[in-house]
Image (tube, coloured by chain):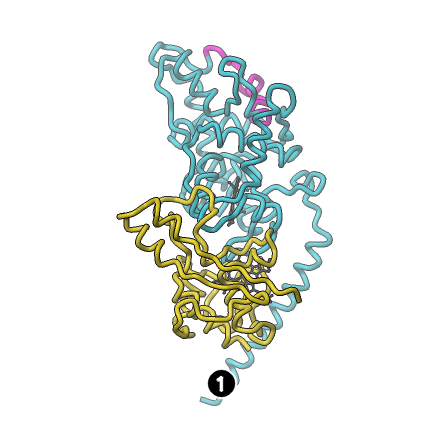
Amino acid sequence: MKNVKSKRGWKLTSIALGSTLMVGAMAIEVIAKDWGSHEVDGRRSGYTYMTDETRAVQDDNFENPGMLWVENGEALWSKAGANGKSCASCHADPEKDMKGVMPAYPKFDKRTGKMISLEQMVNRELVEKMGEKAEKFDSKKMLSLMTYIGNISKGMPVNVKIDGPAKPFFEKGKAFYYQRRGQLDLACSNCHEDNPGKQIRANTLSEGQINGFPTYRLKWQKPGSVHRRFRGCNKNVRAKPYKAGSDEYVNLELFVKWHGRGLPVETPAVRN
Amino acid sequence: MQMRKTTLIAGVLAVASMIGTQSAFSASHMKKYTIENDAINTSLTGKPGDAAKGRKLAVNRKKGNCLACHVISDLKDQPFHGNVGPSLDGVADRYTEGELRLRVVNPKFFHSGSIMPAFYKKSGLNRVIKKFKDKTILTAQEVEDVVAYLKTLK
């Protein structure tokens, strides 16, 4: 008995010591960590709030499970639609033609007079140019195409236009971001502007940036769209979510993307 | 310092507009309370709270979930204490029962920008999902239970 007790005592001290050392190391990390391109003027990609393990999975193209979705998107690029045409019929060199597309959406759309998200643009192409049906934002096909198009711009800085005709939509998205909602009465800013780096029970809050979307969620074993994330955060505060593709979320996406202006595209980012 | 007295009669309006529904029934049961000297000095239900129940409510993610934002050393058997708010250790030494009750009922009374939800409030909220519409996060008796638990944190 005695033996066990003293053994346990020793174990506890070593754990306590270990965690002191860890706290010391973390403090140093906070001061000295250079996040490179993942930090721009104090704005930090969600990448910098992840554990080292998750970051390692994201960084290794062979381990990053989102890369399978990129490959799937690449294969779909030249797959013929109902009318015999594929994406490749009009965009023969996607590595070139699609470069810079992801960082610039949502964009002002002259035809509808409002903002259009990249999923909506892809759907317009599928329906009007290829005779296909529109895809849901989180369908396998849409996530594959989005991940592929996003990955082509990997490393490019997020850069949406918020002036001119986009201005009123930007203002709406901004108002949404700061509006408290739900039974818990919380705005996006309460968590992602006021408390990044803090723990909210088991979760480390990040700045809620969208430069890595679609992000591959290890928990789901698949990628998720920006609007799915918005719905999740709305539901967590017990607020009625909007539909993926709603004007509200497209405007919010414009604001959140601007919020992370200059951060590099990281598609497909990996998250827990 | 300055004495404030506010009597809230939430529920009256809701009853008038939704007679016959289940939520109108619960709305009529929203307890009145009086804020005096920055505190709610009497039990919302007239009954004392149960600290053991309050302890469970503080952990329960669907109820108080106080651990989402607060460290409570008394609950160190539970993993993952958040740190968005201050530690609640010794909170009973810092505040009277009435001050604690007001902080649970509506912390925005002190600081309108607070992230902490008002646990006994149901009007003036935006786009509450149907399941939780016209409901407070905690019932009046649950507020009392949580307050009884907070009083043990010395």
| Quadrant of the rendered image containing residue A144 | top left
- Specify whether A140 is left or right of A70: left
| Residue placed furthest toward the bottom | A2
- Which residue is the site of mark 1? A5
Q: Residue at x 35, y 19 (%)?
A: A133
Q: Residue at x 32, y 50 (%)?
A: B23
Tell me residue A210's x, y (percent).
55, 36
The hue used for chain A is: cyan
Tell me residue A149's x, y (percent).
51, 25
Q: Residue at x 45, y 58 (%)?
A: B120
Residue flagged by tag 1: what amino acid is it? Lys
- Specify whether A23 is left or right of B61: right
Tell me residue B119's x, y (percent).
46, 58
Q: Residue at x 46, y 73 (%)?
A: B149
Q: Quadrant of the C terminus of chain B?
A: bottom right
Provide the chain ID for the residue under circle 1.
A
Residue nearest the observer in this picture, A121 or A87: A121
Q: Residues within 10 Å of mark 1 (few under 14, many from 20)?
A: few
Number of on-image labels: 1
Q: Is residue A119 above or below residue B55?
A: above
Residues shaded magenta? A89-104
| SS at mark 1 in the image | helix
| Residue placed furthest toward the left | B20
Tell me residue A79's x, y (percent).
39, 18
| Quadrant of the rendered image containing residue A217 | top left
The hue used for chain B is: yellow
Q: Is residue A132 above or below residue A63?
A: above
Q: Quadrant of the N terminus of chain B?
A: bottom right
**Residue A233 included in the magenta stretch of the image:** no
